[in-house]
Image (cartoon, grey):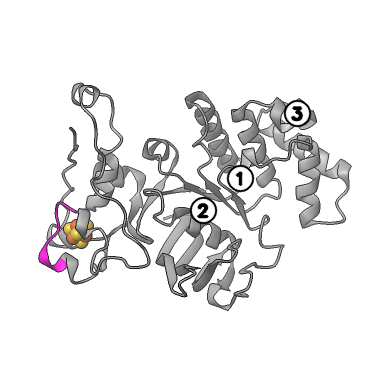
Amino acid sequence: MSKILMRASNVTAVYAADSGQDVPAVDNVTIEVPEGQILGLAGESGCGKTTLGNALAMIANPPLYVVGGKLEIDGKTIDLSTLDKSSNKLHQPFRGATVSLLPQGAMNAVSPTLKIKDLVFDVMRAHDSSVKRSDAMDRATDRLKMLELPTRALDSYAHQLSGGMKQRMVTVISTLLNPRLLIADEPTSALDVSSQKALIEMLLAMVEKKIMAGVIFITHDLPVLSMVTDRLAIMYAGKVVENGRTEDLVHNARHPYTSALLASVLDPTEETRTKHVLGIPGSPPNLGNPPPGCRFHPRCKFAMDVCSKKEPAQLVEGSHEVACWWAKENPGRTIPMEVTVA
Ligand code: SF4
């Protein structure tokens, strides 16, 4: 059993809406990352993945507020409900050094007037105002050599690099302080297939070389997650509905939503080549007024009477957890994967 690097318990984060009603985008979520492993966080757009990533990285800004939960990492415990609600920002040493966030679209946010080496210096100086430029350059150069990346990239402007190289550079910069945990939000989404592969190989090498001790990899791209992750957590409507070893979830999904997600991304077979895959019928609920009971019940083919009345409790089956009444009534059974085509 691997040592746990990070455990986040009962995390709740809300958006303050103009109506005055708080909208819970992350609702009582508990996840953990074993040391040396990559946890994938998957689900449709708007299910709370990015919000959870921001909450765990302590960079939630209004109108997002982290209102509850506890974060344990590297021997430190942070009571999220005691954070300053006007900023939700934790002290600087924690961010970047203990948990680092690679935000969505980071590679396109790099200033066109800065060379990569200037960015390196800016990032390192933000965490240590006494750092010398030469020390920052030495660290970046060593890191690029360690990862077999060209050191000449430091002398380039972002627009002079390919998309794939730019994304690898921002990933390297976000881990220069050797964070214990990297939270990478959609790091491969804007990349072509060969650049995705190069980034994935680099992330795996970074974990192997212990540059960071664990990764949360956020994406809606299940084929990418099944290649790179050790464990998966599936989010729906602000909640984690199933989590476990990647292999178990991919081959033995116990939650209808996980199965439906997997059925939406198929290998090109005769059927999927000649027909239109419809994905999951319906759309995720309004989080300001979610359905009662199981939030997935209006879209679920396996729904029973109880599903619309009572929220399913978390079932623990070894290292596999699932919140579903069907799973409770059908111990050990895999949800049959049904492809919806037109
Ligand atoms: Fe479907 Fe019921 Fe399970 Fe929800 S609890 S996923 S509605 S079977």
Amino acid at pointer 1: Lys
Residue annotated with mark 3: 151
Residue annotated with mark 2: 35
- For the stretch drawn in magenta, the main secondary structure is loop
| Residue range of the region highlighted in magenta in the rendering | 300-306
Neighbor class of circle 1 (other Cα within 10 Å; few <14, some 14-19, many 20+) is some
Magenta stretch encompasses residue 304: yes
Q: Nearer the viewer, residue 175 or 59?
A: 59
Q: Are circles 2 and 3 on residues that touch, CB within 8 Å?
A: no
Q: Is residue 101 above or below residue 157?
A: below
Neighbor class of circle 2 (other Cα within 10 Å; few <14, some 14-19, many 20+) is some
Q: Nearer the viewer, mark 2 or mark 3?
A: 3
Q: Farthest front residue?
A: 19
Q: Is residue 279 above or below residue 86?
A: above
Q: Residue visible at 49% across and 53% down? A: 50
Q: In this view, does 123 lie to the left or right of 72?
A: right
C-alpha span from label 2 to label 3: 30 Å
Q: Which of marks 3 and 1 is in front?
A: 3
Q: Is residue 288 above or below residue 332?
A: below
Q: In which quarter of the image is residue 303?
A: bottom left
C-alpha span from label 1 to label 2: 10 Å
**Residue 150: x and y, percent?**
71, 26
Residue annotated with mark 1: 210
Disc 1 CB within 8 Å of nearest ligand 1 atom: no
Mark earlier in primary sequence (1, 2)? 2
Magenta stretch encompasses residue 148: no
Amino acid at pointer 2: Glu
**Residue 79: x and y, percent?**
55, 75
